[in-house]
Image (cartoon, grey):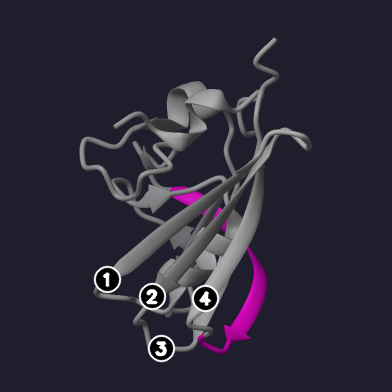
Amino acid sequence: MSKITDKTSEIPEKWYHGSPRVLQVLRAGSCVTPFTELAKAYSHKPTHLDFAFIEDTEREEVIAEVKHDGQQIGFLYEVLLESSDSDLCPSVEETSPLGEEMVTVRDLSLQCLERDIQPMKRYSFKIKIASLS
């Protein structure tokens, strides 16, 4: 099965991490995602994630929906990268069908964007896809 983001049109500039803990630094080997809503789902420490996708070709986007079973209050962080080329590498594990999750190769500073996020069972977001023409 091909990854849904094989059709994305841009390389992400910002990367996010979700955690149930207050963090100042993200340790090397941590997973990050370009999708804030996915990071929020991860912040609740789920044991299971379910993904659903609806493609809207007229708007050239995919609506992604993530359901999870996490119960913890979460925090959303932006990862402060110096260079995505040297700070991140592809994940060897397939953490989601989105395929854009990366792993940090060194300790990185974080900026807290949201705190005390109450668990929602479902998060959804839009992914812009490249024109097929």
Quarter residue 115 falls in = bottom right
Q: Amino acid at mark 3?
A: Gln
Residue density around tag 2, few if under 14, some if 14–19, many if 20 or more, within 10 Å: many
Q: Position of residue 1 (x, y in %)?
A: 29, 32
| x, y percent for residue 107 | 40, 47
Measure how far apart labels 3 and 1 are at the Cα level. Answer: 14 Å
Which residue: 48% across, 88% down?
73
The disc at residue 122 is 4
Instruction: Provide the residue designation for mark 3.
Output: 72
Instruction: Tell me which numbered mark, 4 or 1, is placed earlier along the sequence.
Output: 1
- Magenta segment: does it hold 117? yes
Q: Indicate the amino acid at tag 1.
A: His
Identify the element where label 1 is drawn: loop
Separation (CA) of disc 4 from disc 1? 12 Å
Instruction: Measuring from the top left, give residue 112's x and y in whole percent.
Output: 63, 68
Q: Which marked residue is nearer to the observer: mark 3 or mark 2?
A: 2
